[in-house]
Image: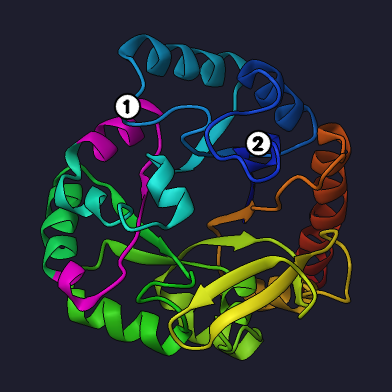
Amino acid sequence: MKLSLSVRVGEPPKQKDITAIPFPELAAKAKALGYDGLSMRASVVSVDSSPERVREVRRVLDEVGIEVSAVCGDIPLAANNAEAVQALRDITPYLDLTEAMGSTLVRIMMQTDADIPFARRAADQAAERGFTLMHINHWGTLFESVEESLETLAAIGRPNVKVAFEPGNLLSCGAAHDPDALARLAPRLVNVFFQNVLVDPSSPIVFNSRRAGPTHLRYVPIDDPAGIDIRPLIDTLHDAGYEGWFTVHQPLFEGENIDHAMRLAADFLRPQMTRRRSNLSR
């Protein structure tokens, strides 16, 4: 299993189009803390970036010596707004950006059954270039539960369309997000995204799911067991023989120091992964 950090950690709260620190600094800090990869978003580079910007970001990645785990090619994909599905209608720029970043995982969004034919065509184009289309479990999409995810994958019928398990979003949709749910999804798993949340009716943060309607959630520190305890889920990943990416998708709290957030996640997750591997090797 490889540990990835979403560049979301560098975005100011409630902003998806900028990072609060320069990308070279963010990449260097991630590498120094032991992250194997970065999950890229439009706040750093997008399909609308100039060729010069794309080359500069790739240069930084190469100099720092860190991989790109996946590419979210525009702001609508990150926001999951009405325009998010447009990437499927013209996937080529997203494939080009992913290739330029040295990755093979291209993030997509599907919100209705009308997106399925476009997903098939996009998957065929991606397969020609050796890429995988990755759909995160997310409210407001066809991947609001493990069952719906598997049904949608079956309807698409393309082996290079896979899922990123995201327990926080599954929680917001009133769907199972426990080890059993993860185990059912494991054969089609290509990434895991983790942001720690708990249900809090007083919170102003609302996830609007198709299954459960509006759900009020509150972000909590990544190591807070009052939210989602990630440890049994990591154990399940090892039991399933999963060797792909595990991505820290935790947002930056208001007033939180970026260095602290990055270090907290690495210090918490690395020992969990190592502990389980050590136990299995005995």
- Which quadrant of the figure has residue 143? bottom left
N-term mark: 1 or 2: 2
Q: Is residue 214 above or below residue 106?
A: below
Q: In which quarter of the image is the N terminus?
A: bottom right
Q: Residue 198 carries which label?
A: none
Of residue 278 and residue 129, the one placed in the foreground of this image is 129
Pointer 2 local density, CA inside 10 Å: few below 14, some 14–19, many at least 20:
many
Q: In this view, does 88 lie above or below 34?
A: below
User: Which percent across, then down, holds residue 223?
Assistant: 87, 62
User: Which percent across, then down, holds residue 271?
Assistant: 86, 57
At x 69%, y 41%, the residue is 9
User: Which percent across, then down, holds residue 40?
Assistant: 51, 37
Q: Residue 11 carries which label?
A: 2
Q: Is residue 111 magenta?
A: yes
- Give SS at disc 2: loop
Pointer 1 local density, CA inside 10 Å: few below 14, some 14–19, many at least 20:
some
- Look at the image and give the residue range highlighted in magenta: 93-116
Which residue bears the numbered disc 1? 48
At x 55%, y 15%, the residue is 60
Of residue 265 and residue 7, the one placed in the foreground of this image is 7
Q: In which quarter of the image is the C terminus?
A: bottom right
138 to the left or right of 150: right
- Give SS at disc 1: loop
Of residue 275 and residue 193, the one placed in the foreground of this image is 193
Of residue 189 and residue 263, the one placed in the foreground of this image is 263
Q: In this view, does 220 lie above or below 95?
A: below
Q: Is residue 189 above or below residue 105?
A: below
- Which quadrant of the figure has residue 34? top right
Report the amino acid beneath label 2.
Answer: Glu
At x 49%, y 38%, the residue is 41
Report the amino acid beneath label 1.
Answer: Asp
